[in-house]
Image (cartoon, rainbow, N blue to C red):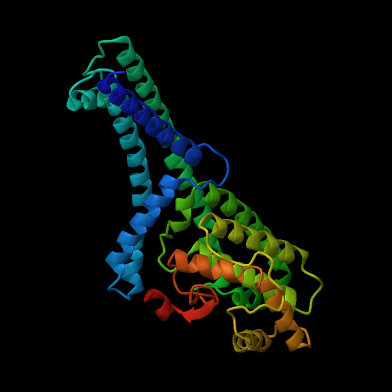
Amino acid sequence: MHAGTVIAVVVFIAGAVVALAALSSSVSMVILPRGAHVRLVRVVMISLRLLFKLRIRSSTSYGVRDRVLAFYAPVSILVVLACWVVGLVAAFTAMMWAVGVHPVRAAFTMSVASITTLGFASPRTMPQTVLSFTEAAFGLVELAMVITFLPSIYSDFHRRERDVTHLRTEAGNPPEGVNILIRLWRLGRLDARNEVWSRMTDWFIDVEESHTSFPMLAFFRSSNPDLSWVTAAGAVLDGAALAASCLNTPRDYEGELCLRTGYLCLRRIAELFRLPYDDDPAPTDRIVVARSEFDEVWNRMADAGVPLKTDRDQAWIDFSGWRVNYDEPLVRLATLTEAPLAPWSSDRGLVDGRPVTFSERIRQ
Protein backbone atom coordinates (compact mmCIF):
# COMPACT_ATOMS: atom_id res chain seq x y z
CA MET A 1 0.00 0.00 0.00
CA HIS A 2 1.30 3.45 -0.93
CA ALA A 3 2.62 5.50 2.01
CA GLY A 4 0.25 8.38 1.17
CA THR A 5 -2.71 6.02 1.30
CA VAL A 6 -1.62 4.65 4.67
CA ILE A 7 -1.34 8.18 6.07
CA ALA A 8 -4.79 9.08 4.72
CA VAL A 9 -6.34 5.98 6.31
CA VAL A 10 -4.69 6.71 9.66
CA VAL A 11 -5.81 10.37 9.55
CA PHE A 12 -9.36 9.33 8.62
CA ILE A 13 -9.56 6.83 11.49
CA ALA A 14 -8.16 9.40 13.93
CA GLY A 15 -10.74 11.93 12.76
CA ALA A 16 -13.57 9.42 13.11
CA VAL A 17 -12.46 8.57 16.67
CA VAL A 18 -12.37 12.26 17.66
CA ALA A 19 -15.80 12.89 16.12
CA LEU A 20 -17.35 9.95 17.96
CA ALA A 21 -15.64 11.01 21.19
CA ALA A 22 -17.06 14.54 20.90
CA LEU A 23 -20.55 13.21 20.17
CA SER A 24 -20.31 10.64 22.97
CA SER A 25 -19.20 13.33 25.43
CA SER A 26 -22.12 15.60 24.58
CA VAL A 27 -24.65 12.75 24.71
CA SER A 28 -23.32 11.61 28.10
CA MET A 29 -23.49 15.14 29.42
CA VAL A 30 -26.85 16.26 28.05
CA ILE A 31 -28.98 13.19 27.37
CA LEU A 32 -27.77 10.39 29.65
CA PRO A 33 -30.10 10.55 32.70
CA ARG A 34 -27.48 9.74 35.32
CA GLY A 35 -24.30 11.15 36.79
CA ALA A 36 -21.48 10.26 34.41
CA HIS A 37 -17.76 10.96 34.65
CA VAL A 38 -17.24 12.79 31.35
CA ARG A 39 -13.50 13.18 30.94
CA LEU A 40 -13.72 16.31 28.78
CA VAL A 41 -15.91 18.08 31.33
CA ARG A 42 -13.58 17.07 34.14
CA VAL A 43 -10.47 18.29 32.28
CA VAL A 44 -12.12 21.60 31.38
CA MET A 45 -13.39 22.23 34.91
CA ILE A 46 -10.09 21.37 36.58
CA SER A 47 -8.09 23.48 34.11
CA LEU A 48 -10.36 26.49 34.48
CA ARG A 49 -10.43 26.09 38.25
CA LEU A 50 -6.64 26.37 38.33
CA LEU A 51 -6.83 29.55 36.24
CA PHE A 52 -9.50 31.06 38.48
CA LYS A 53 -7.49 30.07 41.55
CA LEU A 54 -4.54 32.00 40.16
CA ARG A 55 -6.81 35.01 39.63
CA ILE A 56 -8.02 35.07 43.25
CA ARG A 57 -4.85 33.77 44.82
CA SER A 58 -3.69 37.12 46.16
CA SER A 59 -7.10 38.14 47.52
CA THR A 60 -8.49 37.15 50.90
CA SER A 61 -11.61 39.29 50.44
CA TYR A 62 -14.65 37.07 50.07
CA GLY A 63 -16.45 39.72 48.00
CA VAL A 64 -13.69 39.69 45.38
CA ARG A 65 -13.47 35.91 45.38
CA ASP A 66 -17.23 35.58 44.98
CA ARG A 67 -17.40 38.03 42.05
CA VAL A 68 -14.61 36.20 40.22
CA LEU A 69 -15.88 32.70 40.95
CA ALA A 70 -19.39 33.65 39.79
CA PHE A 71 -18.01 33.38 36.24
CA TYR A 72 -16.45 29.95 36.76
CA ALA A 73 -19.46 27.72 36.05
CA PRO A 74 -20.85 29.75 33.09
CA VAL A 75 -17.39 29.94 31.50
CA SER A 76 -16.93 26.20 32.03
CA ILE A 77 -20.17 25.52 30.16
CA LEU A 78 -19.15 27.75 27.25
CA VAL A 79 -15.72 26.13 27.03
CA VAL A 80 -17.22 22.63 27.04
CA LEU A 81 -19.66 23.61 24.28
CA ALA A 82 -16.79 25.14 22.31
CA CYS A 83 -14.73 21.96 22.75
CA TRP A 84 -17.55 19.86 21.30
CA VAL A 85 -17.81 22.09 18.22
CA VAL A 86 -14.07 22.48 17.74
CA GLY A 87 -13.64 18.72 18.14
CA LEU A 88 -16.17 18.00 15.40
CA VAL A 89 -14.68 20.61 13.06
CA ALA A 90 -11.14 19.28 13.61
CA ALA A 91 -12.28 15.66 13.22
CA PHE A 92 -14.12 16.26 9.95
CA THR A 93 -11.30 18.46 8.68
CA ALA A 94 -9.02 15.46 9.05
CA MET A 95 -11.51 13.13 7.37
CA MET A 96 -12.14 15.59 4.53
CA TRP A 97 -8.40 15.83 3.95
CA ALA A 98 -8.13 12.04 3.99
CA VAL A 99 -10.73 11.69 1.20
CA GLY A 100 -9.01 14.18 -1.06
CA VAL A 101 -9.96 17.72 -0.04
CA HIS A 102 -6.56 19.43 -0.28
CA PRO A 103 -4.89 21.50 1.08
CA VAL A 104 -5.79 21.43 4.79
CA ARG A 105 -7.25 24.93 4.51
CA ALA A 106 -9.75 23.70 1.92
CA ALA A 107 -10.61 20.72 4.14
CA PHE A 108 -11.19 23.09 7.06
CA THR A 109 -13.40 25.33 4.92
CA MET A 110 -15.44 22.32 3.81
CA SER A 111 -15.81 21.17 7.42
CA VAL A 112 -16.99 24.57 8.65
CA ALA A 113 -19.40 24.88 5.72
CA SER A 114 -20.85 21.47 6.53
CA ILE A 115 -21.29 21.87 10.28
CA THR A 116 -22.85 25.32 9.91
CA THR A 117 -24.93 24.16 6.88
CA LEU A 118 -24.12 27.49 5.17
CA GLY A 119 -23.25 25.78 1.90
CA PHE A 120 -20.40 28.07 0.80
CA ALA A 121 -18.26 25.03 -0.11
CA SER A 122 -19.54 22.07 -2.11
CA PRO A 123 -18.26 18.47 -2.01
CA ARG A 124 -17.11 16.99 -5.31
CA THR A 125 -17.02 13.26 -4.71
CA MET A 126 -19.33 10.75 -3.07
CA PRO A 127 -17.11 10.25 0.04
CA GLN A 128 -16.91 14.01 0.48
CA THR A 129 -20.69 14.31 0.10
CA VAL A 130 -21.29 11.58 2.70
CA LEU A 131 -18.92 13.26 5.14
CA SER A 132 -20.50 16.65 4.52
CA PHE A 133 -24.01 15.35 5.24
CA THR A 134 -22.77 13.40 8.28
CA GLU A 135 -21.10 16.46 9.76
CA ALA A 136 -24.21 18.55 9.08
CA ALA A 137 -26.29 15.96 10.93
CA PHE A 138 -23.82 15.93 13.84
CA GLY A 139 -23.93 19.72 13.93
CA LEU A 140 -27.73 19.77 14.06
CA VAL A 141 -27.72 17.18 16.84
CA GLU A 142 -25.24 19.28 18.83
CA LEU A 143 -27.32 22.42 18.24
CA ALA A 144 -30.48 20.65 19.41
CA MET A 145 -28.71 19.44 22.55
CA VAL A 146 -27.35 22.91 23.30
CA ILE A 147 -30.83 24.42 22.87
CA THR A 148 -32.17 22.01 25.50
CA PHE A 149 -29.03 21.96 27.67
CA LEU A 150 -28.81 25.62 28.68
CA PRO A 151 -32.51 26.07 29.58
CA SER A 152 -32.41 22.85 31.61
CA ILE A 153 -29.39 24.03 33.58
CA TYR A 154 -30.87 27.42 34.37
CA SER A 155 -34.26 25.96 35.19
CA ASP A 156 -32.64 23.62 37.72
CA PHE A 157 -30.58 26.49 39.10
CA HIS A 158 -33.56 28.78 39.67
CA ARG A 159 -35.58 25.95 41.23
CA ARG A 160 -32.71 25.24 43.62
CA GLU A 161 -32.25 28.89 44.55
CA ARG A 162 -35.94 29.44 45.27
CA ASP A 163 -35.78 27.12 48.27
CA VAL A 164 -32.36 28.41 49.32
CA THR A 165 -33.82 31.92 49.51
CA HIS A 166 -36.96 30.63 51.22
CA LEU A 167 -34.86 28.96 53.90
CA ARG A 168 -33.29 32.33 54.78
CA THR A 169 -36.48 33.36 56.59
CA GLU A 170 -36.27 30.28 58.80
CA ALA A 171 -32.54 29.62 59.22
CA GLY A 172 -31.23 33.19 59.03
CA ASN A 173 -28.31 34.58 57.06
CA PRO A 174 -25.83 32.97 57.36
CA PRO A 175 -28.04 29.91 57.86
CA GLU A 176 -27.90 27.97 61.12
CA GLY A 177 -29.89 24.87 61.92
CA VAL A 178 -30.60 26.02 65.45
CA ASN A 179 -32.35 29.15 64.14
CA ILE A 180 -35.04 27.02 62.52
CA LEU A 181 -36.03 25.52 65.86
CA ILE A 182 -35.81 28.75 67.86
CA ARG A 183 -37.83 30.81 65.37
CA LEU A 184 -40.57 28.23 65.02
CA TRP A 185 -40.77 27.93 68.82
CA ARG A 186 -41.10 31.70 69.21
CA LEU A 187 -43.90 31.66 66.64
CA GLY A 188 -45.64 28.92 68.58
CA ARG A 189 -45.30 26.56 65.65
CA LEU A 190 -42.53 24.16 66.60
CA ASP A 191 -44.64 21.39 65.11
CA ALA A 192 -44.39 23.18 61.75
CA ARG A 193 -40.78 22.00 61.52
CA ASN A 194 -42.18 18.89 59.83
CA GLU A 195 -43.32 21.11 56.95
CA VAL A 196 -39.76 22.43 56.62
CA TRP A 197 -38.29 18.91 56.67
CA SER A 198 -40.83 17.70 54.08
CA ARG A 199 -40.15 20.64 51.76
CA MET A 200 -36.40 20.25 52.05
CA THR A 201 -36.59 16.48 51.52
CA ASP A 202 -38.07 17.21 48.10
CA TRP A 203 -35.35 19.82 47.59
CA PHE A 204 -32.58 17.32 48.37
CA ILE A 205 -34.06 14.84 45.89
CA ASP A 206 -34.16 17.54 43.20
CA VAL A 207 -30.61 18.73 43.95
CA GLU A 208 -29.21 15.20 43.83
CA GLU A 209 -30.82 14.49 40.46
CA SER A 210 -29.89 17.80 38.84
CA HIS A 211 -26.36 18.19 40.23
CA THR A 212 -25.28 14.67 39.32
CA SER A 213 -26.69 15.12 35.80
CA PHE A 214 -25.11 18.57 35.32
CA PRO A 215 -22.00 18.84 37.56
CA MET A 216 -21.49 22.54 36.70
CA LEU A 217 -24.62 23.33 38.69
CA ALA A 218 -22.73 22.72 41.92
CA PHE A 219 -20.53 25.73 41.11
CA PHE A 220 -23.31 28.14 40.12
CA ARG A 221 -23.28 30.77 42.84
CA SER A 222 -26.42 32.34 44.28
CA SER A 223 -27.41 35.81 43.13
CA ASN A 224 -27.05 36.80 46.80
CA PRO A 225 -23.33 36.42 47.65
CA ASP A 226 -24.21 35.41 51.22
CA LEU A 227 -26.24 32.38 50.16
CA SER A 228 -25.15 28.95 48.98
CA TRP A 229 -26.89 25.66 48.34
CA VAL A 230 -24.18 23.88 50.37
CA THR A 231 -24.58 26.01 53.50
CA ALA A 232 -28.38 25.79 53.14
CA ALA A 233 -28.10 22.00 53.04
CA GLY A 234 -25.88 22.05 56.11
CA ALA A 235 -28.30 24.24 58.05
CA VAL A 236 -31.27 22.00 57.25
CA LEU A 237 -29.41 18.84 58.21
CA ASP A 238 -28.09 20.40 61.43
CA GLY A 239 -31.58 21.61 62.29
CA ALA A 240 -33.03 18.16 61.74
CA ALA A 241 -30.19 16.53 63.70
CA LEU A 242 -30.68 18.95 66.61
CA ALA A 243 -34.42 18.28 66.58
CA ALA A 244 -33.91 14.53 66.60
CA SER A 245 -31.32 14.60 69.38
CA CYS A 246 -32.29 17.52 71.62
CA LEU A 247 -36.01 18.25 71.53
CA ASN A 248 -38.21 16.79 74.25
CA THR A 249 -41.01 16.01 71.79
CA PRO A 250 -42.41 12.90 70.11
CA ARG A 251 -40.11 11.25 67.58
CA ASP A 252 -39.62 13.40 64.48
CA TYR A 253 -40.05 10.98 61.56
CA GLU A 254 -40.07 13.69 58.88
CA GLY A 255 -36.83 15.06 60.26
CA GLU A 256 -35.13 11.69 60.24
CA LEU A 257 -36.23 11.07 56.65
CA CYS A 258 -34.93 14.51 55.69
CA LEU A 259 -31.59 13.68 57.31
CA ARG A 260 -31.24 10.43 55.39
CA THR A 261 -32.29 12.00 52.09
CA GLY A 262 -29.92 14.90 52.66
CA TYR A 263 -26.80 12.97 53.54
CA LEU A 264 -27.36 10.55 50.63
CA CYS A 265 -27.65 13.58 48.34
CA LEU A 266 -24.40 15.14 49.58
CA ARG A 267 -22.60 11.81 49.42
CA ARG A 268 -23.61 11.17 45.82
CA ILE A 269 -22.52 14.64 44.71
CA ALA A 270 -19.25 14.21 46.61
CA GLU A 271 -18.70 10.91 44.81
CA LEU A 272 -19.22 12.61 41.45
CA PHE A 273 -16.38 15.02 42.26
CA ARG A 274 -14.31 12.20 43.75
CA LEU A 275 -14.19 13.80 47.18
CA PRO A 276 -13.06 11.32 49.84
CA TYR A 277 -15.37 10.43 52.73
CA ASP A 278 -16.19 7.45 54.92
CA ASP A 279 -19.35 5.84 53.53
CA ASP A 280 -19.87 3.74 56.67
CA PRO A 281 -18.88 5.90 59.63
CA ALA A 282 -19.31 4.79 63.23
CA PRO A 283 -21.58 6.95 65.42
CA THR A 284 -18.58 7.65 67.65
CA ASP A 285 -16.31 8.92 64.84
CA ARG A 286 -14.98 12.45 65.14
CA ILE A 287 -16.93 15.33 63.60
CA VAL A 288 -15.77 18.89 62.90
CA VAL A 289 -18.31 20.33 65.39
CA ALA A 290 -16.79 20.60 68.85
CA ARG A 291 -18.66 19.71 72.03
CA SER A 292 -18.27 23.34 73.19
CA GLU A 293 -20.06 24.52 70.03
CA PHE A 294 -22.88 22.08 70.64
CA ASP A 295 -23.16 23.30 74.25
CA GLU A 296 -23.40 26.89 73.03
CA VAL A 297 -26.28 25.96 70.71
CA TRP A 298 -27.96 23.99 73.51
CA ASN A 299 -27.77 27.07 75.74
CA ARG A 300 -29.28 29.26 73.04
CA MET A 301 -32.24 26.89 72.72
CA ALA A 302 -32.61 26.69 76.50
CA ASP A 303 -32.54 30.49 76.85
CA ALA A 304 -35.27 30.74 74.18
CA GLY A 305 -37.44 28.28 76.11
CA VAL A 306 -37.29 25.45 73.55
CA PRO A 307 -38.30 22.15 75.26
CA LEU A 308 -35.12 20.11 75.61
CA LYS A 309 -34.29 16.66 76.88
CA THR A 310 -32.83 16.36 80.36
CA ASP A 311 -29.65 14.47 79.41
CA ARG A 312 -27.39 16.86 77.52
CA ASP A 313 -24.55 14.34 77.29
CA GLN A 314 -26.79 11.79 75.58
CA ALA A 315 -28.11 14.51 73.27
CA TRP A 316 -24.52 15.28 72.20
CA ILE A 317 -23.90 11.59 71.51
CA ASP A 318 -27.12 11.38 69.48
CA PHE A 319 -26.33 14.57 67.55
CA SER A 320 -22.82 13.33 66.73
CA GLY A 321 -24.33 10.04 65.55
CA TRP A 322 -26.51 11.91 63.07
CA ARG A 323 -23.94 14.51 62.04
CA VAL A 324 -21.23 11.94 61.24
CA ASN A 325 -23.30 10.76 58.27
CA TYR A 326 -22.97 14.06 56.41
CA ASP A 327 -20.12 15.81 58.23
CA GLU A 328 -17.29 15.03 55.83
CA PRO A 329 -19.19 15.39 52.50
CA LEU A 330 -20.65 18.70 53.70
CA VAL A 331 -17.39 20.40 54.63
CA ARG A 332 -15.59 19.05 51.56
CA LEU A 333 -18.33 20.36 49.23
CA ALA A 334 -18.25 23.71 51.05
CA THR A 335 -14.50 23.88 50.44
CA LEU A 336 -14.81 22.78 46.82
CA THR A 337 -17.47 25.37 45.97
CA GLU A 338 -15.87 28.19 48.01
CA ALA A 339 -19.16 28.66 49.87
CA PRO A 340 -19.75 31.84 51.93
CA LEU A 341 -19.13 31.66 55.65
CA ALA A 342 -21.75 29.76 57.63
CA PRO A 343 -21.45 28.00 61.01
CA TRP A 344 -20.59 24.30 61.07
CA SER A 345 -20.08 24.00 57.30
CA SER A 346 -18.05 26.54 55.31
CA ASP A 347 -16.35 28.15 58.32
CA ARG A 348 -14.13 25.09 58.60
CA GLY A 349 -12.64 22.46 56.33
CA LEU A 350 -10.65 19.25 56.21
CA VAL A 351 -7.04 18.90 55.14
CA ASP A 352 -5.73 15.34 55.40
CA GLY A 353 -8.63 14.63 57.73
CA ARG A 354 -7.68 17.50 60.06
CA PRO A 355 -10.18 20.31 60.70
CA VAL A 356 -8.93 23.74 59.57
CA THR A 357 -10.37 27.23 59.86
CA PHE A 358 -11.67 29.30 56.96
CA SER A 359 -8.61 31.57 56.94
CA GLU A 360 -6.33 28.53 56.80
CA ARG A 361 -8.49 27.03 54.04
CA ILE A 362 -8.27 29.98 51.64
CA ARG A 363 -4.49 29.93 51.90
CA GLN A 364 -4.40 26.34 50.57
Q: Nearer the viewer, residue 213 or 47?
A: 47
| Residue nearest the observer in this picture, 269 or 69 | 269
Q: In which quadrant is the N terminus drawn?
A: top left
Side of 66 relative to 124 (left or right): right
Kindly indicate the quadrant of the structure image that contains residue 224: bottom left
Q: Classify residue 292 by image quadrant.
A: bottom right
Q: Give how far across and how far down residue 223 sits, in percent.
A: 41, 60
Give me the residue at 43% from left, 51% from top: 42
Quadrant of residue 167 within the rendered picture: bottom right
- The quadrant in which the C terminus is found is bottom left
Q: Residue at x 34, y 61 (%)?
A: 50
Image height of 340 relative to 291, above or below: above
Residue 30 vs residue 77: left or right? right
Outermost residue, front side: 1
Indicate the position of residue 87 as horizontal and vertical percent values: 33, 36
Residue 362, relative to residue 279: is it above or below?
below
Q: Residue furthest right?
A: 250
Residue 116 in sight from this viewpoint: no
Labels in figure, total: 0
Q: Position of residue 262 (x, y in %)?
A: 64, 61
In the image, 16: left or right of 246? Answer: left
Question: Could you tell me if residue 156 is visible in this image?
Answer: yes
Between residue 351 and residue 253, name the one nearer to us: 351
Residue at 32 percent of width and 76 percent of height: 60
Q: State the image coordinates of residue 22 (x, y, percent, origin top left).
A: 40, 36
